[in-house]
Image (spheres, helix red, strand yellow):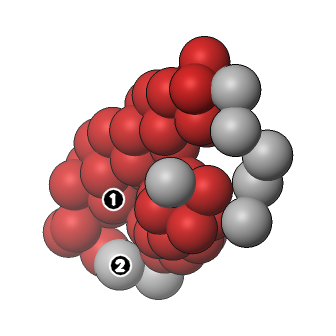
Amino acid sequence: MLGWSFLFLVIALISGVLGFTGIAGVATEIAKILFILFLILWLIALLANALRGRPPN
């Protein structure tokens, strides 16, 4: 589960860099939406891992 949360974080950071710096041009809005979506998914995965009570792998 922690591996998924890091994957979501990396994808969110990449989409944020592409979206917020204007590199993607027309896809800027899509990148912003993906950034927020994957950031939310990362927080959910992190919370789910914390609620399980298992130590991280």
Question: Does 39 sit left or right of 27 as displayed?
Answer: right
Residue 12 visible in this rendered orientation of the protein? no
Tell me which amino acid carries mark 1.
Ala
Front tag of 2 and 1: 1
Residue 17 visible in this rendered orientation of the protein? yes
Which residue, given by chain and number where applicable, does mark 2 sit on? 24
In the rendered image, residue 34, in percent from the top left (x then y), is placed at 31, 51
Q: Residues within 10 Å of mark 1 (few under 14, many from 20)?
A: many
Mark nearer the N terminus (2 vs 1): 2
In the rendered image, residue 31, in percent from the top left (x then y), is placed at 33, 59
Q: Nearer the viewer, residue 6 or 49?
A: 49
Which residue, given by chain and number where applicable, does mark 1 sit on? 31
Question: Does 44 sit left or right of 20 as displayed?
Answer: left
Q: Residues within 10 Å of mark 2 (few under 14, many from 20)?
A: some
Question: Does 45 sit left or right of 47 as displayed?
Answer: left
Write the residue at 61% across / 56% down: 2
Q: Quadrant of residue 57?
A: bottom right
Q: Nearer the viewer, residue 2 or 21?
A: 2
Could you say whether the residue bearing mark 1 is in a helix, strand or loop? helix
Tell whether label 1 touches label 2 (CB within 8 Å).
Answer: yes
Q: Quadrant of residue 49?
A: top right
Q: Nearer the viewer, residue 38 or 31?
A: 38
Tell how many labels: 2
Write the residue at 47% across / 81% down: 23
Q: Would you place residue 56 above or below residue 55 in this image?
A: below
Question: Does 44 sit left or right of 46 as displayed?
Answer: left
Write the residue at 22% across / 67% down: 27
Q: Nearer the viewer, residue 53 or 23?
A: 53
In the rendered image, residue 44, in percent from the top left (x then y), is placed at 46, 28
Tell me which amino acid carries mark 2.
Ala
Determine the CA span between mark 2 and mark 1.
Answer: 8 Å
